[in-house]
Image: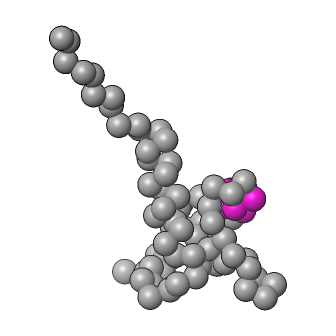
């Protein structure tokens, strides 16, 4: 079975990702990824004239989203 249609494997050695690579890791489109960058939700830097997303910014973004969408339950103090 040809595998040419499969997405390339994630290279864990990459320190910086293109916006397209970050979008692929988040399973969102390029435009959505740029919107996340513009809003400050997803960290990015410029290298020369290029926009790059630090590889560790992707899991950090996901972790913040998970906490915001599923906050930890508040422990109730026992009745005195």
Residue 13: say if magenta. no
Question: Which residues lie in the magenta part?
Answer: 31-38
Query: Do we see residue 21 in this rendering?
Result: no
Q: Quadrant of residue 13?
A: bottom left
Residue depicted at 62% across the width and 61% down the height: 42
* Residue 70 position (above or below residue 76): below
Residue depicted at 75% across the width and 59% down the height: 38
Residue 44 in picture, x, y percent from top left: 66, 71
Residue 73 in picture, x, y percent from top left: 33, 31
* In the displayed structure image, the side of residue 43 where residue 12 appears, left or right: left
Q: Residue furthest right?
A: 49
Residue 54 in picture, x, y percent from top left: 57, 76
* Residue 73 position (above or below residue 20): above
* In the displayed structure image, the side of residue 7 where residue 22 appears, left or right: right
Total number of numbered labels?
A: 0
Q: Nearer the viewer, residue 31 or 54?
A: 54
Query: Do we see residue 45 in this rendering?
Result: yes
Residue depicted at 37% across the width and 80% down the height: 1
Q: Quadrant of residue 79?
A: top left
- What kind of secondary structure does the magenta stretch mostly adopt? helix
* In the displayed structure image, the side of residue 40 where residue 57 appears, left or right: left
């Amino acid at each position: 079975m040809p595998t040419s249609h499969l997405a390339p494997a994630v290279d864990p050695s990459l320190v910086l990702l293109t916006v397209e690579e970050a979008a692929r890791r988040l399973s969102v489109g390029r435009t959505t990824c740029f919107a996340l960058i513009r809003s400050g939700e997803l960290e990015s830097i410029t290298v020369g004239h290029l926009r790059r997303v630090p590889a560790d910014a992707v899991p950090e973004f996901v972790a913040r989203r998970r906490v915001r969408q599923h906050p930890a339950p508040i422990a109730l103090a026992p009745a005195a």
